[in-house]
Image (cartoon, rainbow, N blue to C red):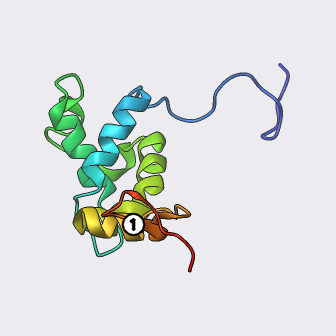
Amino acid sequence: MKMQTYFGCSTKRLGRPPVADLSPTDLREIQSFYLPTNRNKKEGSILLAWVRFCESKPHLRHLVEDHMPATTIPTAVVDACRKAKALVGPARGGRPRLRHESACVPGTMRWNEAAGRRLYAG
């Protein structure tokens, strides 16, 4: 029997199989559940977002019905929620706060809302 080291190249996957196979649309839906949850001012609750998502899907409801350990949250869900973490504070402040505190978009501060065009220099 050939012994394989820990760092050996193997095509066999290591670790537990994923709890659920999630599509990109599912991950966006989980991000939408993550934004309104309140862990603190700058973060939402990944666990609560996952529970609400599972409760909204009949085929995943069995994962959170009786007992929900935090270790069963898929890695893809954690990564998706961490990507949405920058939008938690602005998303709670409504459209004006989202406009000024979200990702930087050059030229948005130099826009004339009344005329619908960029401001002229001078």
Residue 51 sits in quarter: top left
Residue 47 x, y percent position in the rendering: 29, 53
Taking the view exactly as shown, the residue that stands out farthest to the front is 122
Q: Is residue 19 visible?
A: no
Q: Left or right of 107: which side holds 48?
A: left
Identify which residue is drawn at 49% across, 49% down. Answer: 79
Q: Amino acid at mark 1?
A: Asn
Crowding near pointer 1: few (<14 within 10 Å), some, many (20+)?
A: few
Residue under label 1, please give it.
112
Q: Is residue 94 above or below residue 53?
A: below
Q: How many marks can you see?
A: 1
Q: Decide which of 104, 4 is in the foreground and name it.
A: 104
Q: Is residue 13 above or below residue 55?
A: above
Residue 21 sits in quarter: top left
Q: Is residue 48 visible?
A: yes
Identify which residue is drawn at 24% across, 28% down. Answer: 60
Residue 115 x, y percent position in the rendering: 35, 61
> Quadrant of the image for the N terminus?
top right
Q: Is residue 74 above or below residue 116?
A: above
